[in-house]
Amino acid sequence: MAKIDKSKYTKAQWERIRNERRSEKDNKRRAKLIEESINFRPKNNSVSSDTGFIVGNGTSRKPIDISSLQSYGKVYGCNALYRSFSPDYLIAVDVKMILEISKTGYQNKHQVWTNPNKSFNMIKGLNFFHPSKGWSSGPTALWLAAQHDYKTIYILGFDYKGVNNGKNFNNMYADTNNYKKSTDGATFFGNWMRQTRSVIQSHPQIQFIRVIQPDNYIPDELNKFNNLEHIFVEDFKRLFNIS
């Protein structure tokens, strides 16, 4: 867009123009995503060491059968995902979640990764990051997968913004043990986004593909990377033959 001299307008006029330009920019971005999704063609996928899936717990992933993904690559899940599905790697950094997981003995049969913490350092079966990442579970899972030399990593459930126009807590496990209520305020996503950006920026050899719903938020900070694409959930399901 051409640069506008805002000194020629009143404050109210400039605010209107700025909102119109933002809306135009968002519409162009949506149109591009739709075009990319239309042109996205299913590949002949099979179990592959070239593909990894990161499963965050944003509600955008709800229509996706996560269990079907292990036919196509390794799955890295976060926190309460273990309650209904066993990913190849489970990442949890919150003390309450680790204590919940360890009480079930899940870590004795499956890989669970976390940061060292005096609250659970003595629990057997856990795998610890050295040094501690100090990040949230989702970006930590993304970072771990990036260390495993995949060509392509799909990112699911990284919604960033809250539901109900960004107002309320966005999580598949809202209203369950160790999670906030669905009526609670949305979680601040700035750290999540910066940590995600750090992984994508430092691994230019990996193609990252974020799977979203048409109305999901797309941070401007993530638009500048050539190794990040966005596709819609329905196109992702067709890509991997998920009903």
Image (spheres, helix red, strand yellow):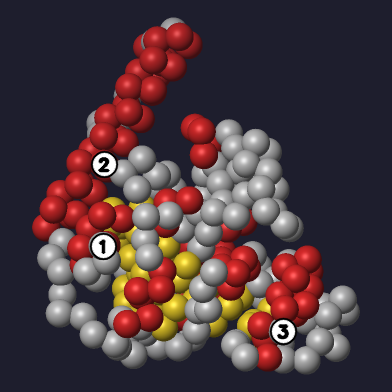
Residue 36 pos. (x, y %): 18, 54
Mark 3 falls on what kind of element? Answer: loop
Q: Amino acid at mark 2?
A: Arg
Question: Between residues 23 and 139, which one lies in front from this camera angle?
Answer: 139
Q: Amino acid at mark 3?
A: Gly
Residue 238 pos. (x, y %): 20, 63
Q: Considering the image in quadrants, where does the N terminus appear?
A: top left
Q: CA distance from mark 3 to mark 1?
A: 32 Å
User: Residue at image x 27%, y 30%?
Assistant: 24
Against 86, residue 17 (above or below) is: above
Q: Which mark is residue 105?
A: 3
Question: On the image, numbered disc 1 is attached to which residue?
Answer: 243
Question: On the image, numbered disc 2 is attached to which residue?
Answer: 30
- Tell me which numbered mark, 3 or 1, is placed earlier along the sequence: 3
Q: Considering the image in quadrants, where does the C terminus appear?
A: bottom left
* Label 2 neighbour load within 10 Å: few <14, some 14-19, many 20+: some
Res 134 visible: no
- Residue 22, image quadrant: top left
Q: Nearer the viewer, mark 2 or mark 1?
A: 1
Mark 1 falls on what kind of element? Answer: loop
* Label 3 neighbour load within 10 Å: few <14, some 14-19, many 20+: few
User: Residue at image x 11%, y 58%?
Assistant: 39
- Residue 7, image quadrant: top left
* Contact? badges 2 and 1 (CB < 8 Å): no
User: Residue at image x 81%, y 87%?
Assistant: 123
Residue at the extreme right of the image, as rendered: 118
Residue 144 pos. (x, y %): 53, 81
